[in-house]
Image (cartoon, helix red, strand yellow):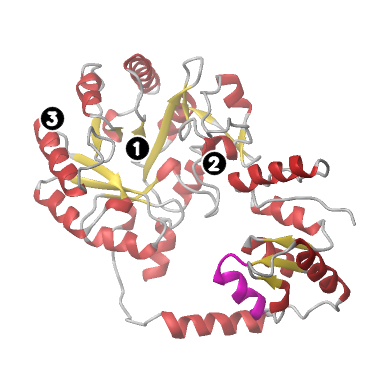
Amino acid sequence: MEWTLFTNGDTYDELFAREVLEAVGHGEKLPTPKDSVQLVQNISSFQGIIAGRMHSNIIAYSLGIPSVGMIWNQKLEFWGKKIKHPERFLSVEQMTPANAVNALFRALDEKPERLLGTRDVYKEISRFVKKYVTSRGVHKELPYRETLLAPALGGIEKRYRNTNSREAFEYSLKHGYINFEVDLRLTSDDILVCVNRWHKDTMKILNIPTNQEGYQKALSFEEFSNAQYYNRISTMNFEEFAQIVSREKQAVKIILGVGQPSKTNFDKISKQLLSAMERYSLDPSRFLIRLEREEDIAFFKSKGLPIEIVYYVVGGKFTQTDTMEERCRKAIALCKTEKIEYISMNGDFYTDEIAATMAKASLKLCLFSYVRTDKIMRAIENGVFYVGSHYYDVQYLERLTQ
């Protein structure tokens, strides 16, 4: 039988697949899928699969392709029972090469199974709602439009995120956002571009190889300009973004995330920000800049850019022994000294008590980022000034709670 390796695109699965091929000494692996469409296309090319990933088994089932699953969590075992083929899903104790291949042969010889239909899906949704959802009949009129913020200019179609692209900005505008965050970094030849760090996650969606540690040196402007996110979304530099913002009639607000640049790079970033803003007559009051280190504040102020500062709590000069409460206390003292009104943090560290502390200190708290609607609503109810959300846009939340 001819065989081919494939993955769902996970970095460590990709590394392991290469190790397997090296150990075997022959064989091939399909290209890394950059989106769900490509993954479905990859799986559709097979007569049968053996897979440890839940989504691969579900996709194969949806296409009528027999699959053998390797159980490493309860979800896979549950899925095997749900489709009435528990024998095709092997526990750790059963997981030998012979068992896996024989299970696949048996599956290929069997008649095609009856796929779950629409009635089954509605039945499952009904069961879930009755078990987990309570009806409180609460109509929440929350200021989503004023509060929700699109990180990295927003997600596209609730799946393509961290692109900092024109497409993301335009998509977010159409779905009700007026507040945005854009990530800015210098290319290797010192051009300011919109990109979410030079990091393995960014390189993965740009389809650019990284080293073993997963970090990558900055791309050149030409390399970055020629790349595409998810093989379909164009990159963008800050000059282009400034021009787009200058034509936007809505009073948008934009947080500029510059990371932790060296003083030399910070100087270059500041000059290009000022140059673009002057060229396109941008109102500085439409922008905020997020700074992650205490020493960056004075340095930025010395550059004379009339842009307000957002201080990032977790990025300050704190040791790992500090509690979040201690970090907040130091950050509040710093903001008071430097006359900073905005303070931000990762949503994972947020508590209701922190929100109350920030409000007492008259600071405008900005959270990045949430993928759960209940957390978004709770933060807004507690007076958080900006709440980052890639997927649940203004229109979605307004429809959900009306």
Where is mark 2, residue-wise? 167
Residue at x 20% of width, y 43% of height = 322
Across and down, in percent, residue 245 comes to 42, 33
Tell me if label 2 and label 1 are in contact, CB under 8 Å.
Answer: no
Q: Is residue 364 above or below residue 315?
A: below
Where is mark 1, residue-wise? 254
Q: Please tell me which of labels 2 and 1 falls first in the chain.
A: 2
| Residue 34 in view, yes or no | no
* Mark linked to residue 338: 3
Q: Circle 2 — which element?
A: helix
The CA span between labels 1 and 3 is 21 Å
Q: What stretch is highlighted in magenta?
A: 71-82
Across and down, in percent, residue 49 comes to 77, 61
Across and down, in percent, residue 310 comes to 25, 36
* Mark linked to residue 392: none
Q: Is residue 125 above or below residue 174?
A: below
